[in-house]
Image (tube, coloured by chain):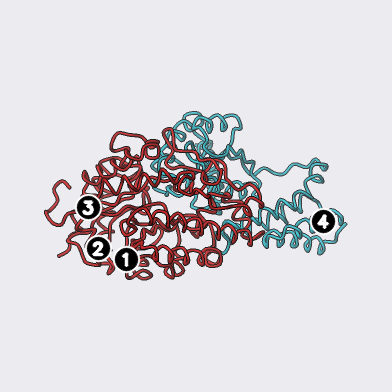
Amino acid sequence: MTGSKQGMSELERLEALLNRQRPDRVPLWPLSLGYSVVNAGYTITDVYSDVKVSIDAQMWAYEQYGWLPIVVIPGPLAAWPALEFGGDVKWPEGDFSQAPTVSRHPVQSDEDILNLKIPDNLEGAGTIPVMLASVAYALERQPKGLVVGLLGIGPMETGRALIGIEKLCRMMYKKPELVHKTFRFVTDFQIAVARLWAEKFDPARICPFVGGPTHSNQVISPKMFKEFCLPYLKEQHAAYREMGYRHFFFHPCGEQNENLPFWAEVEMGDPGIISVGHEIDLARVAEFFPDHIALGNLEPAIVQAQRPHEIYEATRDLVVEHKDIPGGYIFSLGCELPPMAPAGSVWAMTKAVNDFGWYE
Amino acid sequence: MASEDRTKEILEGLKIAVKDFEEEEAAKWAKTALEEGVDPFMATMEGLAEGMISAGDLYNQKEYFVPELLMCSDALHAGLEVLKPAIEASGRQSEVKGSIVLGVVEGDVHDIGKNLVKIMFEVAGWTVHDLGKDVPLAKFVEEQVRTDSDVVGLSALMTTSMLGMPEVIRKLKEKNPNVRILLGGAPINPEVAEKYGADGYAKTAGTAVDEAIHLLKMLREEEMGKQKG
């Protein structure tokens, strides 16, 4: 990092936090999948069409800015799972897209739900082969540090990909038994995929990406979250721990204040990394997840639209206020770093962490 | 012909059926309204629509969420299905409160927020021109010109798709300086809306109609001020 004091390396900072020790300075790790690839001279389309570009670009950005060595596997994100069950996915293209979306949901009728089945050849289904190849490449390119993989987004996310959000929301009242049937299925499916990964790679190096925005209280009530999602999440996360996944990257996304007490009942790793949106005060993360690392949570729109000096000040305020969170603190945004954020704005954020993030 | 008290009872029945998302009850009360001679237009606006407005209030108070609003909307439509033929047969036109072009901007297919906004404008008596999702930027301008709408509502859920908004706003204002532009969506906040040149920002579907009405009121006051000046 230009102008930074000499101290621990970024890997040492990450290892310190994961071992529940305080590093010498607040580290910085923005969710920078899209930004890193654009920064390296490619397009958002390349994030998903060329995994090597995607992973190399993240490592390039980490070295350029001095960010933590945590590589994200460029999976189908909110479009997971769809291709695996006969649906269609639209990959980002053009000037304004950011992420893959489901263009045709696999489930078109109630009967389709009853017929959902984990593919016999799981290793060859949909996006799974590309994700496996991506993990292998990421682990090879980055022998230390963490790899975050799309393994554990919750049942509202995966259910939405299969069924569609409006239909799923209506079913929660009209056909709750089918919602449970769907959530049972996606939980079993994701556990099967996680087991496949754990057989092929060292699960201690892989951080399942868990959570998701469709569970937010901008969509469903905390009561529905508790009734429909919590039991499956508890089971899923506990199964991952048994398989040897040590650290989870938990990103609930959006306004989930009323869900936090329930999320706190779910296994999050040893320790987990708790990444919340700007809608949630990091003090609440410390309250509900005292043994985990807090990550966040500058509003992405600020980085996209405001001036560098404003971003610098907003970053400073967050770092100063939250650097002493007992479980440890990583500065980040509340969601993905805007892929088209001006370089000067990203540098302002990085500089503020370096100016104000040091521990005595 | 229903008495005044009975009419009130029927309107309340319609309202509660929508608020409590009881589709069958909404259809039943709508049939009762027709059978007992209640003006179908009144049954729609003072019964069904009032129920949806109550649902919007509960959404703003975080007592209702997306599933509940969608269920209320289904009950509303169940009642409307019954009343619509009678309204059309009467030839009566509703008083249009305003006209809005709505859409999710290019590159973005997240339309649930926009769909909720559409429902709330419709029940508030607005004419809604819904362009859908992933709408090419130029289409907003064409549609505003074609419909001469008072307000254009742009929605985005991604920090990349929001980047198209300033271009749409600039072109809209070039064509028609009086059009009022309302932004919404997760990456938008009041500061971004202002920076992009929009006239207003709606944090939720439940506040969008009030914000649009406020923008139109301001516009009318400006116009009156100019006339006096």
- Callout 4–callout 1 Cβ contact below 8 Å: no
**Mark sitting earlier along the chain (2/1):** 2
In the image, the chain rendered in red is A
- Residue at figure coordinates x 50%, y 54% from the top left: A157
| Amino acid, disc 4 | Ala
Q: From where the camera sits, is residue A302 visible? A: no
Task: Please say whether residue B91 is visible from this viewpoint.
Answer: yes
Q: Which residue is mark 3?
A: A352
Mark 3 and mark 1 residues within 8 Å of each other at the beta carbon:
no
Q: Colour of chain B?
A: cyan
Which chain does the numbered disc 3 sit on? Answer: A
Mark 2 in CB contact with mark 1 (< 8 angstroms): yes
- In the picture, the disc for residue B33 is 4
Subunit of mark 2?
A
Q: Is the same chain shared between marks 3 and 1?
A: yes
Q: Is residue A353 left or right of residue B99?
A: left
Amino acid type at circle 3 is Ala
